[in-house]
Amino acid sequence: MNIDEKIADDLIANDISFVTTVPCKQLAGVIDEIDKRDGIYHIPANKEDEGMGLCAGAWMGGKRPAIIMQNTAIGVTINTLATLIQYYRMPLPMLISYRGELREPIACQVEMAVHTKALLAQMNIPTYHFHHQADVAELDAILKYTFMCNKPVAILTDANFWGGYGD
Amino acid sequence: MIRSEILKEIAPILRDQLVVCNIGIPSQELHAIDDQPSNFYMLGTMGLASSIGLGLALSQPKPVIVIDGDGSVLTNLGTLPTIANNVADNYILLIIDNGSYGSTGDQPTYAGRKTSLAKMAEAAGCDRVIECQAKQTGRVLQEALDARQMTIIVSKCESGNAKMPPITMDPVVIRDRFMKAVQA
């Protein structure tokens, strides 16, 4: 199974047509795949809170959005999640590369990894963690859940899920 | 002229359009001057009005006018290259540039000193950027709507705020009636 293709297929099957991204090495393949799909408007953002603003506008304009970003972005976007996405009750699937987990080569990434789940829990954000490739089978149900409840939902995808760094 | 005087003057133009309005006193002023379901008031999240408006403009065909401020654009400067590189000809960004952070006590911004937001928008790649004086804002805004071309307007005005009550409407109500206005 190619997980990049599977993720893009699931986004399209759930009518997600507006995707903003801030890149990560782990996410390079899925971002390439989204760029190739005609059914998705891909708009790279310079910062993740900006990306969430774009997604909020797209949703009010009638398109289903998603954001793809690193877990470091949780540190950037707490205020936007609380006062825009949650306050106005908007759905936002967040596909997040979970840097600083098992098989991570860069020590500094661990410093935000240790806060990631605690911050998401503090924000009452439903959180799923993909550790094995087979976990991607739940993505379709997670996307349906997100647009059912109109909440931001986090999908953490770690290095093991993406196949490591060639280690 | 101060911001509220500009808003009073352009209210008849804004009335029939989708408007995304910046956090704080600008939203309070617009709400008090001419509340419309087609106004999306930001109650929090400084800096994202231009991004919300761009997402909206890219996702549906109606014109979108964003009322932003110099301080808010400065806090989200990455928005200018994103706007320039994702052209939506139904998008107008009106930056009311009073050179100060109005909602927090009129502290000066860098836009009131050496920094030109119009030049920054041009350098970011925005094709149609117009800097005007406060009293020309209505004419320039109407011309931008008529041009049907993505436009960034920087309207230079004086610092100061009108005394208006806070918005007490529930955010979900603001959002819901706005989405109905988008679909109408």
Image (cartoon, grey):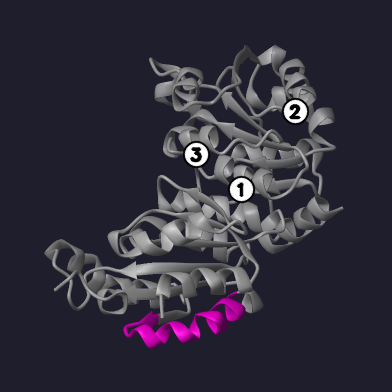
Looking at the rendered structure, which numbered label has been put on residue B55?
1
Provide the secondary structure element on which disc 1 rests. helix
Q: Say which of A81 and B163 sits in front.
A: A81
Q: Say which of B104 and B96 sits in front.
A: B96
The amino acid type found where label 2 is placed reads Arg
Provide the secondary structure element on which disc 2 rests. loop
Label 3 or label 2, whichever comes before in sequence order: 3
The amino acid type found where label 1 is placed reads Gly
Asked whether the residues under marks 1 and 2 belong to the same chain, the reply is: yes
Q: Is residue A118 left or right of residue B70?
A: left
Q: Which residues are magenta?
A: A129-146
Asked if residue B40 is positioned above or below residue A159 in the image, the reply reads above
Q: Residue at x 79, y 51 (%)?
A: B182
Q: Is residue B55 left or right of residue B120?
A: right
Locate residue A5, reporting x and y percent.
47, 71
Q: Say which of B142 and A44 sits in front.
A: A44
- The quadrant the N terminus of chain A occupies is bottom left
Q: Identify the subunit bearing mark 1.
A: B
**Which residue matches tag 2?**
B148
Q: Residue at x 61, y 38 (%)?
A: B25
Magenta residue check for A96: no
Mark 2 crowdedness (10 Å alpha carbons): few <14, some 14-19, many ≥20: some
Q: Residue at x 25, y 71 (%)?
A: A113
Is residue A111 in view?
Answer: yes
Asked if residue A128 is positioned above or below residue B56 in the image, the reply reads below
- The quadrant the C terminus of chain A occupies is bottom left
Asked whether the residues under marks 3 and 1 belong to the same chain, the reply is: yes
**How far apart in space, not on screen, are marks 1 and 2 (Cα)?**
17 Å
**Which residue matches tag 3?**
B82
**How far apart in space, not on screen, are marks 3 and 1 (Cα)?**
11 Å
Provide the secondary structure element on which disc 3 rests. helix
The amino acid type found where label 3 is placed reads Thr
